[in-house]
Image (cartoon, helix red, strand yellow):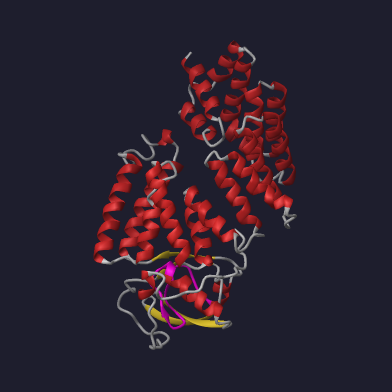
Amino acid sequence: MRKTSLIVCLLVSTGLCGCVRMLAKTSQVPRAGEIMKAPPERGLKVMQVFDNSPARMAGIESGDIIMQYGQYLIVDDASFFLARTHYEDSAQRTVEVVIYRRSRQMLLTVPTGWLGVMTADSDKVSESFWALMNNVKAKWEIPEYMYDREFKGQFNGGPAKFLAQAKVLVDQAERDRTLTPVQIMIARIYMILDDAPEEDLRRQAELLKELFSTQPVSFIHMLGNDKFYADHRYLPAIACLNHYLKFSPDDVSIRLNVGFAYNELGMYDEADRATDYVFEHELGISDYGRYVAYINKAKAALGRKEYSRSIQLGQKAFEFNPNGGTYPLMLIQLAAAQTGDMGRLKATAQRFQQAFPSKYLEWRLQIDAAEAYGLVKNNQLDAARKLVEKWKDSDRPEGRVRASWRLYPDGMDIARNFSDLMKS
């Protein structure tokens, strides 16, 4: 995701947030190469360093633990962004950072501002918490038909089990003060899923409001895009990214991500408005950006059952990125199947085969499932049964069809029709 320059408008004050108490100044200057018997108990672990980034040029590597930024100790993401904001506001061009790497402390000089790294809080409690949250995320990402074979026994109890364990962990950490107040706040926001009861969602909104009032915009942007959005927590992602857009309204990538997130929540009018902002304000947009924009609008039209419009927008998306992805063609397949447009179904399948011959073989089951739905719409039941029957001896065809088409608005119509034909 393209990183943008941020206008930091929030002043950092030690009275704003409890985590600042852990953002302690230190006068100690580390010695380069100093040996440490064990990694620091707290810090910020570098998970990824982007190519051609300031971090890469400064010599930071994946696996490094950031211990100090300028004069400030780093204990988590929040303390890093508060320290970073302090030096950005001071107009200082470079800052020294202390990192831990393979039993040694190292002193490096980096530009102030965006580093170009993906990070994670480095402490035992955080590692345990995010391991549980990764199980919740995997439960959504891994197709259900794989639960009883490839992942047998790993998801017994579902997300509720992992969320309950995480709550116990966070409650204990709050009592023991083994996590900072901001880490506690983010964990509690993260544990509330998008389909949670309304009371929980109101509590999440209150926590987000508190977060926005105490943290730099750069930190909110990172949370919204790299944490919540990346992990399919679309409600807090939208809140964070819309807050960030108040300060950087021309960030096209974030506008498009917000539109995508609204679509995932079934908020199709909001998805359209978020995407249309890019066109209405004539923001600079690449061909790939137009591809994503038209995908957003095609999906929103599909969700509103505007099938002809969805097909038109899906075709526009494909034109801007004909070699990039199969998603617009699958959107067109679904819209055509919903209207029983067999000519469109066959033409799109042919285009799919020409553009992505290897993927066509991989997706042939899903394409046939869409065609079978179109045939049923045209009351050609025998032809639909014959088309589906050829898949009866393949590996878990119903589960594979369901796993693919559930990602599209009303795509489960194709999956249910496929299962009904299989049974008949």
Q: With respect to residue 59, does 127 lie above or below?
A: above
Residue appearing at x 52%, y 82% in the figure: 95
Residue 287 in sight from this viewpoint: no
**Which image quadrant: the N terminus?**
bottom right
Q: Position of residue 356 (x, y in %)?
A: 67, 39
**Residue 363 or residue 26, whichever sits in front:** 26
Q: Would you identify the image quadrant in which residue 335 lies?
A: top right
Judge by depth and name the residue closer to the eye, 359 or 118. Answer: 118
Tell me: 289 left or right of 362: right
In percent of width and height, residue 130 lies at: 37, 56
**Count of numbered labels shown in the rendering:** 0
| Magenta span includes 237 | no
Where residue 241 sits in the image (x, y, percent)?
Answer: 55, 56
Does the segment drawn in magenta span residue 60? yes
Q: Residue 358: which quarter of the image?
A: top right
* Residue 399 visible in image: yes
In this picture, which residue range is highlighted in magenta?
Answer: 59-78
What residue is rendered at 56% in x and 35% in y?
408
